[in-house]
Image (spheres, rainbow, N blue to C red):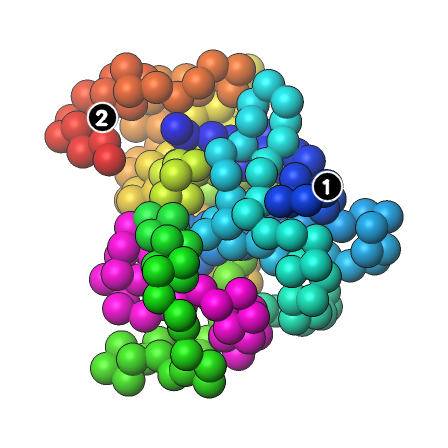
């Protein structure tokens, strides 16, 4: 199911033995446009501390009770490598995080969004079936670069969105698949461009370039396409009918995963 990340922020988190806090933010990979971590605020349980939770351990977000189940205990989370809130999440930190929980690295294999798979649950199941050796090294043939590629969903909100010919609005939200955690759409708020304004969905593959320095997303489509595209209603679920309608508008095949 496609879900608004803005809506999920604030959901309560339930570990295997007790409550562990609330969803504070998400970190996404700016190359593959997939959610790599939820940032959990542990509140009064671990005051002043935020921890990372991978989609590998996340259940489905409950829309009615606004809760997430996390397949980790309080002890596991308390003992995970401490996160310096003032520093970016490095690849070295990620290695320590994955080693702590005994999960396969998502960057090994370099084939799908989640290494050898397109689904994070495959990595969780692999960890149950096969013991991950200590002091392991990623496959040398597919060693990723060490540059940080994780970005905050909270931080990207408000970025200017430029079509191929002019600015058409700003980032209001991001829409992700709550099974694969791939980001499918950016929600563009056009109220500062169109009289009366409306929210529209920008397909992630239409994002041509991003300037993190200038806080701008560049699109491959023109402003007229955005102006006439189907309006997005945040109160309504994004179902297959809506997606097909949108694909038809842009004259594209129905490549809905």
Q: Quadrant of the N terminus?
A: top left
Q: Position of residue 161 (x, y in %)?
A: 46, 42
Q: Compared with residue 159, is residue 12 higher up or lower down, i.e. above or below?
A: above
Residue at the image point whose x is 63% and y is 31% from the top = 67
Q: Quadrant of the C terminus?
A: top left
Residue stretch in magenta: 92-118
* Residue in the foreground of this view, choosing between 75 and 85: 75
Name the residue that disc number 1 marks: 19
Q: Residues within 10 Å of mark 2 (few under 14, many from 20)?
A: some
Residue at the image point whose x is 56% and y is 23% from the top = 63
Q: Position of residue 148 (x, y in %)?
A: 50, 71
Q: Compared with residue 68, is residue 48 higher up or lower down, i.e. above or below?
A: below
Magenta stretch: dominant secondary structure: loop
> Mark 1 or 2, which is nearer the eye?
1
Q: Position of residue 139 (x, y in %)?
A: 29, 80
Name the residue that disc number 2 marks: 247
Left or right of 245? Residue 252 is left
Left or right of 9? Residue 201 is left
Q: Is residue 7 magenta?
A: no
């Amino acid at each position: 199911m496609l879900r608004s990340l803005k809506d999920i922020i604030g959901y309560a988190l339930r570990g295997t033995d007790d409550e562990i806090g609330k969803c504070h933010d998400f970190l996404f990979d700016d190359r593959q446009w997939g959610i790599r971590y939820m940032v959990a605020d542990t509140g009064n349980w671990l005051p002043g501390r935020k921890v990372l939770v991978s989609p590998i351990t996340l259940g489905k977000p409950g829309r009615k009770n606004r809760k997430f189940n996390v397949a980790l205990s309080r002890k596991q989370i308390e003992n995970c490598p401490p996160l310096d809130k003032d520093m970016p999440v490095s690849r070295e930190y990620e290695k320590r995080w994955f080693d702590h929980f005994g999960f396969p690295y998502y960057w090994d294999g370099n084939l799908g969004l989640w290494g050898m798979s397109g689904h994070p649950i495959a990595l969780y199941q692999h960890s149950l079936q096969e013991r991950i050796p200590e002091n392991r090294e990623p496959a040398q043939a597919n060693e990723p670069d060490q540059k940080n590629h994780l970005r905050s969903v909270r931080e990207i909100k408000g970025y200017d969105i430029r079509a191929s010919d002019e600015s058409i609005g700003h980032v209001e939200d991001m829409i992700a698949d709550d099974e694969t955690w791939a980001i499918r759409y950016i929600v563009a708020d056009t109220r500062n461009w169109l009289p009366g304004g409306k929210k529209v969905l920008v397909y992630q593959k239409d994002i041509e370039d991003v300037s993190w320095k200038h806080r701008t997303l560049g699109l491959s489509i023109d402003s007229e396409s955005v102006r006439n595209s189907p309006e997005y209603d945040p109160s309504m679920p994004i179902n297959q009918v809506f997606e097909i309608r949108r694909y038809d508008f842009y004259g594209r095949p129905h490549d809905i995963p």
